[in-house]
């Protein structure tokens, strides 16, 4: 069996997988390129800048953008539930195949035929399977909502998101407290 040794960092695009034997041989030679990731480590993570209110923006505008953002986030959650509904309904429909098979195996052909003809592949609402509902929701509601929220953010806040939350965070943190750093690099304990 040829086990592929997973490197810590992604390999170069066209690099061949490193087998356990090759990794061991490299370690013995002291050649750790592609094994430990020392040569391939990505650049250090740079956090995005903390959002700053554009000059002259009122508290009411910040609150309005926060409310708009919150409404979009709620829509994101609803969309996730819709996708869950889509996947769960599709999974249930595929699971019916096993129920039909077992009903037939148990000698209940009439009941198996009934499930197969009445439920398997049935539309969830007239004329629609769940994927069509998801596609219609995305096209009719979600994408226009997300596009409008982004355009308004561009117009009023130079594209910055979460201004309301950034200001709330700044107001609620305790300066100097080890669990309230402003930036991620302040997270590391001394």
Image: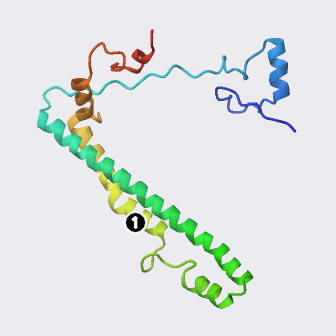
Relative height, residue 56 to residue 183 (above, below): below
Quadrant assignment for the C terminus: top left
Color theme of the render: rainbow
What secondary structure is marked by label 1? helix
Relative height, residue 11 to residue 101 (above, below): above
User: Which residue is nearer to you in this view: 31 or 180?
Assistant: 180
Q: Is residue 158 visible?
A: no
The image quadrant of residue 163 is: top left
Q: Is residue 24 visible?
A: yes
| Residue farthest toward the top in the current orientation of the protein | 190
What residue is at 67 percent from the left and 73 percent from the top? 98
| Residue farthest toward the front in the current orientation of the protein | 106
* Residue 45: % across, % down: 48, 22
* Residue 176: % across, % down: 30, 12
Count of residue discs: 1
* Residue 33: % across, % down: 73, 18
* Residue 183: % across, % down: 37, 20
What residue is at 85 percent from the left and 26 percent from the top? 21
User: Which residue is nearer to you in this view: 180 or 144?
Assistant: 180
Residue that mark 1 sits on = 136
Tell me if 136 is positioned left or right of 18 in this view.
left
Relative height, residue 131 to residue 52 (above, below): below
Count neighbours of disc 1 (C-alpha within 10 A) and say few if under 14, some if 14 to 19, many if 20 or more: few
What residue is at 42 percent from the left and 77 percent from the top? 125
Tell me if 35 is positioned left or right of 111 in this view.
right
Tell me if 87 is positioned left or right of 171 in this view.
right
User: Which residue is nearer to you in this view: 157 or 22?
Assistant: 22
Tell me if 89 is positioned left or right of 34 in this view.
left
What residue is at 37 percent from the left and 51 percent from the top? 76
User: Which residue is nearer to you in this view: 27 or 107?
Assistant: 107
The image quadrant of residue 1 is: top right
């Amino acid at each position: 069996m040829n086990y592929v040794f997973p490197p810590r960092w992604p390999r170069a695009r066209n690099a061949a997988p490193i087998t356990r034997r090759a990794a061991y041989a490299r370690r013995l030679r002291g050649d750790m390129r592609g094994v430990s990731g020392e040569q391939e480590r990505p650049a250090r993570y740079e956090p995005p800048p903390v959002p700053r209110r554009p000059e002259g923006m009122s508290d009411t505008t910040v609150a309005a953008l926060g409310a708009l953002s919150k409404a979009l986030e709620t829509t994101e959650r609803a969309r996730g539930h819709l996708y869950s509904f889509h996947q769960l309904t599709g999974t249930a429909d595929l699971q019916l195949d096993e129920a039909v098979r077992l009903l037939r195996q148990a000698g209940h052909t009439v009941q198996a035929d009934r499930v197969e003809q009445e439920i398997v592949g049935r539309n969830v609402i007239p004329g629609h399977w769940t994927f069509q509902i998801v596609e219609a929701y995305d096209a009719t509601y979600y994408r226009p909502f997300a596009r409008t929220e982004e355009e308004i953010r561009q117009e009023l806040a130079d594209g910055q998101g979460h201004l309301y939350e950034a200001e709330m965070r700044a107001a609620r943190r305790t300066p100097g407290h080890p669990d309230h750093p402003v930036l991620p690099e302040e997270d590391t304990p001394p």
